[in-house]
Image (spheres, rainbow, N blue to C red):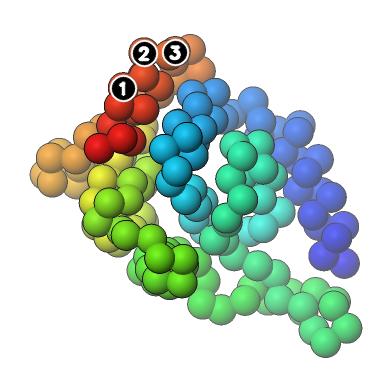
């Protein structure tokens, strides 16, 4: 049952995931919200993984993968198509933006991997965050800002982000 998976996701988040999140990212989200930006989390993860993270960060809009259910609400063992990843993630972001009147050339995007290049290329302010090697190379080639955050990252980074968000 889907609700049981959601409960499992919450438990996994509390026991395993919350400690892996960079505290400064909650401040990044808050800074964008203070600027009146619509904050959307797009993830190739399933709802049981993505939604608890989004709630913790204060994000209400989540674009992610969903388990398919039958007419009686039972899990089929499949994932709703199209799978949110790569170009399909970019399509989901474009559709959400169009439906909500979001101006992508004025929008910010954050990622750590090359699978999100289509999303980062769609926004006006792409940011590579602790990028894996492929994205680090792509960001250097495109002169995108690279953000390095850690568990000890402080207010200095957040102040810079707030300044950038007002542009």
Q: Which residue is mark 1?
A: 160
Relative to 84, is 144 on the left or the right? left
Towards the viewer: 40 or 51: 40
**Would residue 133 be visible to someone looking at this image?**
no
- Measuring from the top left, give residue 157's x and y in whole percent: 36, 19
Relative to 84, is 110 on the left or the right? left
Relative to 151, is 10 on the left or the right? right
Q: Are marks 2 and 3 in contact (CB under 8 Å)?
A: yes
Q: Secondary structure at mark 2?
A: helix
Q: Crowding near pointer 2: few (<14 within 10 Å), some, many (20+)?
A: few
Q: Which residue is located at x 87 percent, y 67 percent?
A: 1
Quadrant of the image for the C terminus?
top left
Q: Are marks 1 and 2 in contact (CB under 8 Å)?
A: yes
Position of 7 relative to 15 (above/below): below
Q: Which residue is located at x 36 percent, y 32 percent?
A: 130
Towards the viewer: 135 or 104: 104
Q: Residue furthest bottom?
A: 71
Q: Which mark is residue 156?
A: 2
- Measuring from the top left, give residue 37's x and y in whole percent: 43, 46
Question: Which of marks 3 and 1 precedes in the sequence?
Answer: 3
Q: Which mark is residue 154?
A: 3
How far is disc 2 from disc 3 in space, using C-alphas? Answer: 6 Å
The part of the image, by quadrant, that contains residue 154 is top left
The part of the image, by quadrant, that contains residue 145 is top left
Q: Secondary structure at mark 1?
A: helix
Q: Which residue is located at x 45 percent, y 20 percent?
A: 150
Q: Crowding near pointer 3: few (<14 within 10 Å), some, many (20+)?
A: few
Towards the viewer: 92 or 116: 92
Q: Which residue is located at x 28 percent, y 32 percent?
A: 164
How far is disc 1 from disc 3 in space, using C-alphas? Answer: 11 Å
How far is disc 1 from disc 2 in space, using C-alphas? Answer: 6 Å
- Measuring from the top left, give residue 6's x and y in whole percent: 79, 54
């Amino acid at each position: 049952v889907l609700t049981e998976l959601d409960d499992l996701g919450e438990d996994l988040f509390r026991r395993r995931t919350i400690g892996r999140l960079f505290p400064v990212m909650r401040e990044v989200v808050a800074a964008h919200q203070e600027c009146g930006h619509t904050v959307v989390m797009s993830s190739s993860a399933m709802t049981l993984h993505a939604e608890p993270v989004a709630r913790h960060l204060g994000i209400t809009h989540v674009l992610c993968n969903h388990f398919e259910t039958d007419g009686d609400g039972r899990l089929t063992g499949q994932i709703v198509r199209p799978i949110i990843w790569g170009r399909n993630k970019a399509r989901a972001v474009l559709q959400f933006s169009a439906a909500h009147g979001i101006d992508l050339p004025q929008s910010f995007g954050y990622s750590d991997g090359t699978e999100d290049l289509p999303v980062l290329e769609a926004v006006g302010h792409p940011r590579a965050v602790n990028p894996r090697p492929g994205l680090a190379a792509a960001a250097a080639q495109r002169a995108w800002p690279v953000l390095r955050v850690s568990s000890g990252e402080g207010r200095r980074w957040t102040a810079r982000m707030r300044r950038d968000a007002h542009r």
